[in-house]
Image: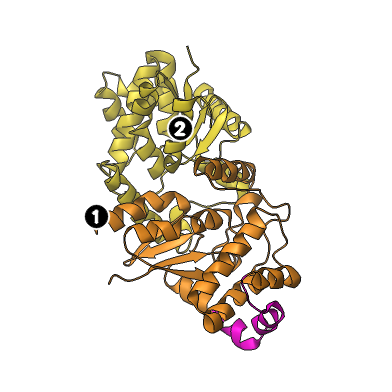
Chain colours: A orange, B yellow
Amino acid sequence: MSDPIDFYFDLSSPYGYLASTRIEELAARYGRTVRWRPMLLGVVFKMNGCAPLTEVPLKGQYSVHDFYRTARLHGIPYKHPEKFPLSVQLASRAMLWLEETHGERKAIEFAQVVYRAYFVEGEDITDPDILAALAEGLGVDGDVMIEEANTPAIKDRFRAEVAAAMERGVFGSPFVIVDGEPFWGFDRFYQIEALLKNGRI
Amino acid sequence: MSDPIDFYFDLSSPYGYLASTRIEELAARYGRTVRWRPMLLGVVFKMNGCAPLTEVPLKGQYSVHDFYRTARLHGIPYKHPEKFPLSVQLASRAMLWLEETHGERKAIEFAQVVYRAYFVEGEDITDPDILAALAEGLGVDGDVMIEEANTPAIKDRFRAEVAAAMERGVFGSPFVIVDGEPFWGFDRFYQIEALLKNGRI
Protein backbone atom coordinates (compact mmCIF):
# COMPACT_ATOMS: atom_id res chain seq x y z
CA MET A 1 0.00 0.00 0.00
CA SER A 2 1.41 3.36 -1.00
CA ASP A 3 1.71 6.26 1.42
CA PRO A 4 -1.07 8.84 1.62
CA ILE A 5 -0.71 12.12 -0.22
CA ASP A 6 -0.20 15.12 2.07
CA PHE A 7 -2.51 17.98 1.11
CA TYR A 8 -1.73 21.28 2.87
CA PHE A 9 -4.22 24.11 2.56
CA ASP A 10 -5.25 27.38 4.15
CA LEU A 11 -9.03 27.57 4.61
CA SER A 12 -9.11 31.11 3.21
CA SER A 13 -7.04 30.28 0.12
CA PRO A 14 -8.95 30.35 -3.21
CA TYR A 15 -6.54 27.99 -4.96
CA GLY A 16 -6.60 25.79 -1.86
CA TYR A 17 -10.38 25.61 -2.22
CA LEU A 18 -10.16 24.78 -5.93
CA ALA A 19 -7.64 22.04 -5.17
CA SER A 20 -9.83 20.68 -2.36
CA THR A 21 -12.57 19.90 -4.86
CA ARG A 22 -10.22 17.72 -6.96
CA ILE A 23 -7.56 16.18 -4.71
CA GLU A 24 -9.64 13.22 -3.52
CA GLU A 25 -10.65 12.06 -7.01
CA LEU A 26 -7.10 12.55 -8.29
CA ALA A 27 -5.65 10.44 -5.49
CA ALA A 28 -8.38 7.79 -5.76
CA ARG A 29 -7.67 7.32 -9.49
CA TYR A 30 -4.24 6.03 -8.49
CA GLY A 31 -5.32 4.09 -5.41
CA ARG A 32 -4.06 6.71 -2.99
CA THR A 33 -5.60 8.33 0.06
CA VAL A 34 -5.19 11.96 1.13
CA ARG A 35 -4.09 13.41 4.47
CA TRP A 36 -5.71 16.85 4.79
CA ARG A 37 -3.44 19.25 6.70
CA PRO A 38 -4.73 22.76 7.51
CA MET A 39 -2.03 25.46 7.58
CA LEU A 40 -1.88 29.24 7.85
CA LEU A 41 -0.53 31.38 5.03
CA GLY A 42 -0.37 34.33 7.43
CA VAL A 43 2.35 32.60 9.45
CA VAL A 44 4.34 31.92 6.28
CA PHE A 45 3.95 35.54 5.12
CA LYS A 46 5.26 36.77 8.47
CA MET A 47 8.34 34.64 7.94
CA ASN A 48 9.06 35.36 4.26
CA GLY A 49 7.76 38.91 3.89
CA CYS A 50 5.17 38.01 1.24
CA ALA A 51 1.60 39.34 1.22
CA PRO A 52 -1.77 37.87 0.23
CA LEU A 53 -1.98 37.78 -3.60
CA THR A 54 -4.95 40.11 -3.69
CA GLU A 55 -3.09 42.82 -1.76
CA VAL A 56 -0.16 43.08 -4.17
CA PRO A 57 -0.44 45.98 -6.68
CA LEU A 58 -1.44 44.81 -10.21
CA LYS A 59 -1.27 41.17 -9.09
CA GLY A 60 -4.30 41.69 -6.86
CA GLN A 61 -6.79 42.56 -9.58
CA TYR A 62 -5.46 39.87 -11.89
CA SER A 63 -5.66 37.25 -9.16
CA VAL A 64 -9.38 37.64 -8.57
CA HIS A 65 -9.92 37.45 -12.33
CA ASP A 66 -7.84 34.27 -12.40
CA PHE A 67 -9.73 32.68 -9.47
CA TYR A 68 -12.97 33.00 -11.44
CA ARG A 69 -11.48 31.97 -14.77
CA THR A 70 -9.68 28.94 -13.37
CA ALA A 71 -12.75 27.83 -11.42
CA ARG A 72 -14.92 28.19 -14.55
CA LEU A 73 -12.50 26.25 -16.74
CA HIS A 74 -12.52 23.37 -14.26
CA GLY A 75 -16.28 23.47 -13.67
CA ILE A 76 -15.95 24.49 -10.02
CA PRO A 77 -18.44 26.96 -8.48
CA TYR A 78 -16.74 30.12 -7.20
CA LYS A 79 -17.83 33.46 -5.80
CA HIS A 80 -15.05 35.65 -4.48
CA PRO A 81 -15.86 36.55 -0.85
CA GLU A 82 -16.41 40.21 -0.05
CA LYS A 83 -14.38 39.88 3.13
CA PHE A 84 -11.06 38.42 2.05
CA PRO A 85 -8.82 37.00 3.35
CA LEU A 86 -10.11 35.94 6.74
CA SER A 87 -8.51 34.49 9.83
CA VAL A 88 -9.19 30.77 9.74
CA GLN A 89 -7.59 29.86 13.05
CA LEU A 90 -10.84 28.76 14.69
CA ALA A 91 -12.12 26.78 11.71
CA SER A 92 -8.76 25.04 11.35
CA ARG A 93 -8.59 24.11 15.02
CA ALA A 94 -12.16 22.85 14.86
CA MET A 95 -11.07 20.60 12.03
CA LEU A 96 -8.22 19.21 14.11
CA TRP A 97 -10.55 18.53 17.03
CA LEU A 98 -12.98 16.74 14.72
CA GLU A 99 -10.16 14.61 13.41
CA GLU A 100 -9.17 13.57 16.93
CA THR A 101 -12.69 12.87 18.15
CA HIS A 102 -14.76 11.96 15.10
CA GLY A 103 -12.12 10.62 12.75
CA GLU A 104 -10.36 11.75 9.62
CA ARG A 105 -13.37 11.44 7.30
CA LYS A 106 -15.53 13.79 9.40
CA ALA A 107 -12.69 16.33 9.56
CA ILE A 108 -12.34 16.29 5.77
CA GLU A 109 -16.08 16.75 5.33
CA PHE A 110 -15.91 19.70 7.68
CA ALA A 111 -13.07 21.32 5.70
CA GLN A 112 -15.11 20.81 2.53
CA VAL A 113 -18.26 22.44 3.91
CA VAL A 114 -16.23 25.32 5.37
CA TYR A 115 -14.59 25.94 1.99
CA ARG A 116 -17.95 25.82 0.25
CA ALA A 117 -19.55 28.13 2.82
CA TYR A 118 -16.80 30.70 2.24
CA PHE A 119 -16.11 30.45 -1.51
CA VAL A 120 -19.58 29.59 -2.80
CA GLU A 121 -22.11 30.86 -0.24
CA GLY A 122 -20.09 33.88 0.90
CA GLU A 123 -20.51 33.09 4.58
CA ASP A 124 -18.29 34.52 7.32
CA ILE A 125 -16.26 31.51 8.42
CA THR A 126 -14.74 33.40 11.33
CA ASP A 127 -18.18 33.36 13.01
CA PRO A 128 -18.41 30.58 15.66
CA ASP A 129 -22.18 30.29 15.11
CA ILE A 130 -21.73 29.65 11.42
CA LEU A 131 -19.00 27.07 12.06
CA ALA A 132 -21.20 25.40 14.69
CA ALA A 133 -24.09 25.24 12.25
CA LEU A 134 -21.85 23.68 9.58
CA ALA A 135 -20.80 21.05 12.13
CA GLU A 136 -24.42 20.35 13.07
CA GLY A 137 -25.08 19.66 9.39
CA LEU A 138 -22.54 16.84 9.69
CA GLY A 139 -24.14 15.42 12.81
CA VAL A 140 -21.65 16.98 15.21
CA ASP A 141 -22.50 19.01 18.33
CA GLY A 142 -21.48 22.47 17.13
CA ASP A 143 -21.30 24.16 20.52
CA VAL A 144 -19.02 21.47 21.90
CA MET A 145 -16.83 21.72 18.83
CA ILE A 146 -16.37 25.48 19.22
CA GLU A 147 -15.62 25.13 22.92
CA GLU A 148 -13.08 22.38 22.29
CA ALA A 149 -11.50 24.25 19.37
CA ASN A 150 -10.61 27.04 21.79
CA THR A 151 -8.72 24.96 24.35
CA PRO A 152 -4.99 25.66 24.84
CA ALA A 153 -4.25 22.04 23.94
CA ILE A 154 -5.73 22.38 20.45
CA LYS A 155 -4.14 25.80 19.97
CA ASP A 156 -0.76 24.32 20.82
CA ARG A 157 -1.34 21.40 18.52
CA PHE A 158 -2.27 23.59 15.58
CA ARG A 159 0.72 25.87 16.18
CA ALA A 160 2.97 22.82 16.17
CA GLU A 161 1.36 21.50 12.97
CA VAL A 162 1.89 24.78 11.12
CA ALA A 163 5.51 24.91 12.28
CA ALA A 164 6.04 21.30 11.21
CA ALA A 165 4.58 22.06 7.79
CA MET A 166 7.00 24.94 7.31
CA GLU A 167 9.86 22.74 8.42
CA ARG A 168 8.89 20.38 5.60
CA GLY A 169 9.14 23.32 3.20
CA VAL A 170 5.43 24.14 2.91
CA PHE A 171 5.02 27.82 2.01
CA GLY A 172 1.82 28.04 -0.02
CA SER A 173 -1.71 26.76 -0.47
CA PRO A 174 -2.40 24.31 -1.90
CA PHE A 175 0.84 22.50 -1.25
CA VAL A 176 0.93 18.78 -1.95
CA ILE A 177 3.66 16.30 -1.05
CA VAL A 178 3.61 12.95 -2.86
CA ASP A 179 6.31 10.41 -2.03
CA GLY A 180 8.57 13.22 -0.84
CA GLU A 181 8.01 15.33 -3.98
CA PRO A 182 6.61 18.84 -3.27
CA PHE A 183 4.07 20.61 -5.49
CA TRP A 184 2.85 24.17 -4.98
CA GLY A 185 -0.36 25.30 -6.60
CA PHE A 186 -3.54 23.94 -8.14
CA ASP A 187 -1.80 24.45 -11.49
CA ARG A 188 0.68 21.72 -10.60
CA PHE A 189 -2.01 19.02 -10.44
CA TYR A 190 -1.07 17.80 -13.92
CA GLN A 191 2.45 17.25 -12.57
CA ILE A 192 1.12 15.38 -9.53
CA GLU A 193 -0.85 13.20 -11.92
CA ALA A 194 2.27 12.54 -14.00
CA LEU A 195 4.07 11.36 -10.85
CA LEU A 196 1.18 9.17 -9.69
CA LYS A 197 0.85 7.65 -13.16
CA ASN A 198 4.50 7.01 -13.93
CA GLY A 199 5.86 6.47 -10.42
CA ARG A 200 8.50 9.14 -11.08
CA ILE A 201 8.75 12.67 -12.40
CA MET B 1 -6.95 38.63 -39.50
CA SER B 2 -6.87 38.34 -35.70
CA ASP B 3 -4.66 40.57 -33.57
CA PRO B 4 -1.21 39.34 -32.56
CA ILE B 5 -0.69 37.84 -29.13
CA ASP B 6 1.36 40.04 -26.79
CA PHE B 7 4.09 38.03 -25.08
CA TYR B 8 5.83 39.89 -22.24
CA PHE B 9 8.98 38.37 -20.77
CA ASP B 10 12.03 39.20 -18.69
CA LEU B 11 15.20 37.79 -20.25
CA SER B 12 16.38 36.47 -16.87
CA SER B 13 13.06 34.77 -16.03
CA PRO B 14 13.12 30.95 -16.04
CA TYR B 15 9.38 30.60 -16.69
CA GLY B 16 9.71 33.33 -19.33
CA TYR B 17 12.34 31.19 -21.03
CA LEU B 18 10.18 28.06 -20.84
CA ALA B 19 7.27 30.00 -22.33
CA SER B 20 9.49 31.41 -25.08
CA THR B 21 10.12 27.91 -26.39
CA ARG B 22 6.37 27.25 -26.81
CA ILE B 23 4.58 30.52 -27.52
CA GLU B 24 5.23 30.60 -31.29
CA GLU B 25 3.94 27.09 -31.95
CA LEU B 26 0.90 27.67 -29.72
CA ALA B 27 -0.01 30.87 -31.56
CA ALA B 28 0.66 29.36 -34.99
CA ARG B 29 -1.70 26.44 -34.28
CA TYR B 30 -4.51 29.00 -34.15
CA GLY B 31 -3.31 31.23 -37.00
CA ARG B 32 -1.95 33.90 -34.69
CA THR B 33 1.34 35.77 -34.61
CA VAL B 34 3.24 36.86 -31.50
CA ARG B 35 4.54 40.29 -30.50
CA TRP B 36 7.58 39.72 -28.26
CA ARG B 37 7.83 42.47 -25.60
CA PRO B 38 10.85 42.49 -23.25
CA MET B 39 10.11 43.80 -19.75
CA LEU B 40 11.96 44.04 -16.44
CA LEU B 41 10.75 42.20 -13.37
CA GLY B 42 13.09 44.33 -11.24
CA VAL B 43 11.04 47.44 -12.03
CA VAL B 44 7.82 45.63 -11.07
CA PHE B 45 9.37 44.37 -7.82
CA LYS B 46 10.40 47.93 -6.94
CA MET B 47 6.77 48.98 -7.35
CA ASN B 48 5.02 46.10 -5.58
CA GLY B 49 7.56 45.08 -2.97
CA CYS B 50 7.96 41.54 -4.27
CA ALA B 51 11.30 39.77 -4.63
CA PRO B 52 12.74 37.29 -7.14
CA LEU B 53 11.23 33.84 -6.47
CA THR B 54 14.58 32.29 -5.69
CA GLU B 55 15.30 34.83 -2.95
CA VAL B 56 12.14 34.13 -0.91
CA PRO B 57 12.67 31.74 2.04
CA LEU B 58 11.36 28.19 1.38
CA LYS B 59 9.95 29.32 -1.98
CA GLY B 60 13.47 29.81 -3.33
CA GLN B 61 14.62 26.22 -3.03
CA TYR B 62 11.31 24.89 -4.30
CA SER B 63 11.37 27.20 -7.29
CA VAL B 64 14.65 25.92 -8.67
CA HIS B 65 13.36 22.38 -8.24
CA ASP B 66 10.21 23.37 -10.11
CA PHE B 67 12.14 25.05 -12.97
CA TYR B 68 13.92 21.75 -13.64
CA ARG B 69 10.86 19.58 -13.17
CA THR B 70 8.61 21.71 -15.36
CA ALA B 71 11.26 21.96 -18.08
CA ARG B 72 11.74 18.18 -18.00
CA LEU B 73 8.01 17.45 -18.18
CA HIS B 74 7.70 19.67 -21.26
CA GLY B 75 10.87 18.37 -22.91
CA ILE B 76 12.69 21.70 -22.69
CA PRO B 77 16.43 21.81 -21.95
CA TYR B 78 17.22 23.70 -18.72
CA LYS B 79 20.27 24.35 -16.60
CA HIS B 80 19.76 26.79 -13.76
CA PRO B 81 22.39 29.55 -14.13
CA GLU B 82 24.93 29.93 -11.34
CA LYS B 83 24.58 33.73 -11.47
CA PHE B 84 20.88 34.39 -11.06
CA PRO B 85 19.03 36.63 -11.62
CA LEU B 86 20.99 38.99 -13.86
CA SER B 87 20.39 42.50 -15.12
CA VAL B 88 19.09 42.13 -18.66
CA GLN B 89 18.85 45.83 -19.49
CA LEU B 90 21.50 45.70 -22.21
CA ALA B 91 20.24 42.51 -23.84
CA SER B 92 16.68 43.85 -23.84
CA ARG B 93 17.68 47.16 -25.40
CA ALA B 94 19.72 45.30 -28.00
CA MET B 95 16.59 43.39 -28.87
CA LEU B 96 14.64 46.63 -29.32
CA TRP B 97 17.36 48.05 -31.56
CA LEU B 98 17.35 44.89 -33.67
CA GLU B 99 13.60 45.15 -34.04
CA GLU B 100 13.88 48.73 -35.31
CA THR B 101 16.73 48.09 -37.70
CA HIS B 102 16.56 44.43 -38.71
CA GLY B 103 12.87 43.67 -38.25
CA GLU B 104 10.74 41.77 -35.79
CA ARG B 105 11.88 38.31 -36.84
CA LYS B 106 15.56 39.05 -36.18
CA ALA B 107 14.69 40.53 -32.77
CA ILE B 108 12.78 37.39 -31.80
CA GLU B 109 15.65 35.17 -32.92
CA PHE B 110 17.97 37.25 -30.77
CA ALA B 111 15.74 36.88 -27.71
CA GLN B 112 15.68 33.13 -28.32
CA VAL B 113 19.47 32.80 -28.56
CA VAL B 114 19.93 35.00 -25.48
CA TYR B 115 17.53 32.83 -23.50
CA ARG B 116 19.28 29.68 -24.65
CA ALA B 117 22.72 31.14 -23.88
CA TYR B 118 21.60 31.89 -20.32
CA PHE B 119 19.36 28.95 -19.42
CA VAL B 120 21.03 26.17 -21.37
CA GLU B 121 24.66 27.17 -21.93
CA GLY B 122 25.07 29.09 -18.66
CA GLU B 123 26.62 32.13 -20.35
CA ASP B 124 26.80 35.57 -18.74
CA ILE B 125 24.28 37.56 -20.76
CA THR B 126 25.27 40.81 -19.06
CA ASP B 127 28.59 40.60 -20.95
CA PRO B 128 28.57 42.85 -24.07
CA ASP B 129 31.07 40.57 -25.83
CA ILE B 130 28.81 37.55 -25.38
CA LEU B 131 25.78 39.47 -26.61
CA ALA B 132 27.77 40.75 -29.61
CA ALA B 133 28.85 37.20 -30.45
CA LEU B 134 25.24 35.99 -30.25
CA ALA B 135 24.26 38.78 -32.67
CA GLU B 136 27.08 37.85 -35.05
CA GLY B 137 25.68 34.34 -35.15
CA LEU B 138 22.51 35.87 -36.58
CA GLY B 139 24.39 37.85 -39.21
CA VAL B 140 24.28 41.12 -37.30
CA ASP B 141 27.25 43.40 -36.56
CA GLY B 142 27.61 42.79 -32.83
CA ASP B 143 29.76 45.81 -32.02
CA VAL B 144 27.33 48.16 -33.72
CA MET B 145 24.45 46.54 -31.86
CA ILE B 146 26.08 47.03 -28.46
CA GLU B 147 26.93 50.63 -29.26
CA GLU B 148 23.40 51.36 -30.44
CA ALA B 149 21.84 49.55 -27.48
CA ASN B 150 23.56 52.05 -25.20
CA THR B 151 22.22 55.24 -26.78
CA PRO B 152 19.92 57.46 -24.68
CA ALA B 153 17.21 57.09 -27.33
CA ILE B 154 17.01 53.31 -26.89
CA LYS B 155 17.24 53.62 -23.11
CA ASP B 156 14.31 56.02 -23.13
CA ARG B 157 12.33 53.77 -25.41
CA PHE B 158 12.86 50.70 -23.25
CA ARG B 159 11.96 52.65 -20.12
CA ALA B 160 8.74 53.78 -21.79
CA GLU B 161 7.94 50.23 -22.95
CA VAL B 162 8.34 48.81 -19.44
CA ALA B 163 6.13 51.57 -18.02
CA ALA B 164 3.52 50.96 -20.72
CA ALA B 165 3.53 47.24 -19.93
CA MET B 166 2.88 47.94 -16.27
CA GLU B 167 0.10 50.33 -17.20
CA ARG B 168 -1.51 47.42 -19.07
CA GLY B 169 -1.30 45.41 -15.85
CA VAL B 170 1.79 43.34 -16.66
CA PHE B 171 3.51 42.30 -13.42
CA GLY B 172 5.14 38.97 -14.16
CA SER B 173 7.04 36.89 -16.68
CA PRO B 174 5.77 35.35 -18.82
CA PHE B 175 2.70 37.52 -19.15
CA VAL B 176 0.54 37.01 -22.23
CA ILE B 177 -2.35 39.16 -23.41
CA VAL B 178 -4.70 37.61 -25.97
CA ASP B 179 -7.64 39.69 -27.21
CA GLY B 180 -7.49 41.76 -24.03
CA GLU B 181 -7.41 38.73 -21.74
CA PRO B 182 -4.34 38.60 -19.42
CA PHE B 183 -2.49 35.40 -18.48
CA TRP B 184 0.38 35.19 -16.01
CA GLY B 185 2.69 32.21 -16.05
CA PHE B 186 3.78 29.35 -18.25
CA ASP B 187 1.26 27.25 -16.30
CA ARG B 188 -1.59 29.27 -17.85
CA PHE B 189 -0.74 28.14 -21.39
CA TYR B 190 -3.58 25.59 -21.28
CA GLN B 191 -5.94 28.47 -20.56
CA ILE B 192 -4.52 30.52 -23.43
CA GLU B 193 -5.09 27.51 -25.66
CA ALA B 194 -8.69 27.23 -24.44
CA LEU B 195 -9.28 30.88 -25.39
CA LEU B 196 -7.63 30.51 -28.81
CA LYS B 197 -9.61 27.35 -29.51
CA ASN B 198 -13.04 28.48 -28.33
CA GLY B 199 -12.82 32.21 -28.99
CA ARG B 200 -13.83 32.86 -25.39
CA ILE B 201 -12.88 31.73 -21.90
Q: Rate crowding at label 2 as few (under 14), some (14 to 19) or many (20 or more) other CA atoms within 10 Å.
A: some
Residue at the limit of the structure toward the top, as seen here: B1
Q: Residue A63: x, y in percent?
A: 59, 45
Residues in magenta, as a range: A138-159
Q: Which of the image's four quarters has the N terminus of chain A?
A: bottom left
- Determine which quarter of the picture holds residue A182: bottom left
- Residue A139 is a magenta residue: yes
Q: Residue at x 56, y 46 (%)?
A: B45
Residue behind mark 1? A198
Q: Amino acid type of disc 2?
A: Ala
Instruction: Using the rendered image, report if marks 1 and 2 lie on a common chain.
Output: no
The dot on residue B109 is: none
Q: Is residue B10 visible?
A: no
Q: Rate crowding at label 1 as few (under 14), some (14 to 19) or many (20 or more) other CA atoms within 10 Å.
A: few
- Could you say whether the residue bearing mark 2 is in a helix, strand or loop? helix
Nearer to me, B38 or A144:
A144
- Report the chain holding disc 1: A
Residue behind mark 2? B194
Q: Residue at x 58, y 61 (%)?
A: A49
Left or right side of A151 for B60: left
Reply above or below: B33 against B87: above
Left or right side of B33 for B70: left
Nearer to me, B171 or A150:
A150
Q: Amino acid type of disc 1?
A: Asn
- Residue A194 is a magenta residue: no
Q: Residue A119: x, y in percent?
A: 64, 54
- Could you say whether the residue bearing mark 1 is in a helix, strand or loop? helix
Instruction: Give the distance between the C-alpha atoms of the residues marked 1 and 2, in whole angstroms.
Output: 26 Å
Q: Residue at x 47, y 24 (%)?
A: B5
Nearer to me, A168 or B165:
A168
- Asked if disc 1 and disc 2 are in contact, CB closer than 8 Å, the reply is no
